[in-house]
Image: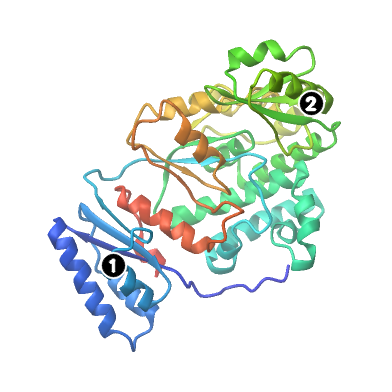
């Protein structure tokens, strides 16, 4: 891995706060004048000194910028794409962390965070060292490959063994960065593999044990015959009659969005059949058929590995993807639960429905892409205006990773969540 490390942070989060809207405008004008008078000072020093004076009043404004001139221009014009303003009465709104499963990964996910954010880099490094004996490679060389190896790494990241381990590493490191900034999950939900991240953070598994289990789980699935997955815009009730003897309902991601898993030929036939009925279907980029009867062969072998681990009661509540409701201590500490987890339908839609019972919750996808946040936004139980955010950019977006995550951090602060602004200095 030949990546430049420990670059200085080029992007900065500016925050403004006041007791009234008019006072906020005065504060903004004062900041503009202060910036104009400070052209001979280092921009980092200017931003740092100003952050130390900010208090969390109800009228709030944020801007993410990388130069003094850009900051002045955006504030003077109140550029709607860069400057965001809120009136927020709520304090200490609960944040729910959502952890995606396989399919969300991409090469160089969070690369700029790895280069710039010390906490993120340290956690990626710790996890990668733990994984070395289980993967027989350094996963950092696949997540962050040299330019000449990007195509090879992209193919490797599609392998279940590598994909699941890589996702765990990035999601865990992202969580530690959020926690450093003062954003703590009051609840969590994980989609399939993502539940392992939630369980680890809740204290069910130690980090070392969780990484070992994720690697073993990925290897056992990787060794099975190949399979496929198909997303279908139908409800669970509508899909089940089409499953037959060979296909399985892998996931329920929305009231009218299901994932079917099984042999590739059977899914091709189902795709043709449903297309003739004008049912929207989308083949997913999958090499195997998780959460299907294909997994029956590895349930007992995987269980034997889990039985060697110490499982503890969860200290942070999280939603079980098996039941679609809150995990119990009996489930979290039962090796049978984790063995069945590979096979059972992922009930993510029901989990969202449970979380949406409290509309004050802010849902934050922690990990690459927007898969889970998109499902949450489209869910019919979501209250109007309920906040759903993603913390890492989509792979097709060219935006700076740091700029992106600082904007999300600013949005969270605007919505009434306490943030450790001093940690950004």
* Tag 1 and tag 2, C-beta contact below 8 Å: no
Could you tell me which secondary element the residue under label 1 belongs to? helix
380 is higher (above) or lower (below) than 160: above
Q: How many marks?
A: 2
Query: Whole-percent x and y of residue 37?
Result: 25, 85
Judge from the rendering whether residue 82 lies leftward or rightward of residue 105; answer left or right: left
394 is higher (above) or lower (below) than 3: above
Residue to which mark 1 is pinned: 77
Could you tell me which secondary element the residue under label 2 belongs to? helix
Judge from the rendering whether residue 251 lies leftward or rightward of residue 425; answer left or right: right
At horizontal 79% and vertical 37% (from top left) the residue drawn is 287
User: What is the quadrant of the N terminus in the image?
Assistant: bottom right
At horizontal 55% and vertical 74% (from top left) the residue drawn is 7
Q: CA distance from mark 1 to mark 2?
A: 54 Å
At horizontal 33% and vertical 63% (from top left) the residue drawn is 79
Ranked by sequence position, the earlier of labels 1 and 2 is 1
Residue to which mark 2 is pinned: 268
- Colour scheme used in the picture? rainbow
Query: Whole-percent x and y of residue 395?
Result: 61, 53
């Amino acid at each position: 891995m030949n990546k430049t490390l420990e670059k200085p942070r080029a992007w900065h989060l500016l925050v403004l706060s006041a007791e009234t809207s008019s006072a906020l405008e005065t504060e903004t004008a004062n900041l503009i004048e202060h910036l104009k008078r400070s052209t001979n000072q280092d921009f980092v020093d200017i931003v740092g000194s100003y952050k130390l004076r900010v208090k969390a009043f109800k009228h709030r404004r944020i801007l993410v910028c990388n130069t003094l001139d850009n900051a002045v221009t955006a504030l003077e014009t109140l550029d709607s794409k860069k400057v965001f303003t809120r009136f927020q009465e709520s304090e200490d709104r609960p944040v729910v962390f959502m952890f995606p499963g396989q399919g969300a990964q991409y090469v160089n996910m969070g690369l700029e965070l790895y280069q710039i954010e010390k906490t993120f880099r340290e956690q990626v490094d710790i996890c990668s060292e733990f994984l070395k004996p289980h993967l027989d490679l350094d996963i950092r060389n696949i997540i962050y490959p040299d330019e000449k190896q990007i195509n090879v790494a992209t193919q490797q990241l599609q392998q279940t063994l590598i994909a699941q381990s890589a996702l765990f590493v990035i999601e865990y490191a992202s969580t530690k960065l959020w926690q450093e900034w003062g954003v703590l999950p009051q609840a969590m939900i994980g989609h399939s593999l993502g539940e392992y991240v939630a369980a680890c953070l809740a204290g069910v598994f130690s980090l070392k044990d969780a990484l070992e289990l994720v690697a073993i789980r990925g290897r056992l699935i990787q060794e099975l015959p190949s399979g496929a997955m198909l997303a279908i815009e139908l409800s669970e009730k509508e899909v089940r009659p089409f499953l037959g003897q060979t296909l399985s309902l892998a996931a329920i991601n929305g009231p009218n969005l299901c994932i079917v898993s099984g042999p590739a030929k059977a899914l091709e036939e189902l795709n043709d059949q449903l297309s003739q009925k004008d049912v929207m279907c989308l083949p997913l980029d999958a090499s195997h058929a998780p959460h299907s009867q294909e997994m029956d062969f590895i349930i007992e072998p995987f269980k034997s590995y889990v039985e060697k681990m110490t499982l503890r009661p969860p200290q942070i509540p999280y939603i079980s993807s098996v039941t679609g409701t809150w995990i119990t201590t009996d489930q979290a500490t039962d090796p049978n639960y984790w063995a069945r987890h590979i096979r059972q339908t992922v009930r993510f839609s029901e989990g969202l429905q449970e979380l949406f019972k409290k509309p004050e919750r802010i849902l934050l996808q922690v990990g690459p892409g927007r898969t889970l946040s998109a499902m949450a936004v489209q869910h019919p139980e979501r209250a109007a205006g309920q906040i759903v955010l993603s913390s890492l950019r989509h792979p097709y977006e060219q935006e700076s990773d740091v700029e992106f995550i600082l904007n999300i951090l600013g949005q969270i602060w605007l919505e009434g969540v306490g943030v450790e602004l001093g940690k950004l200095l």
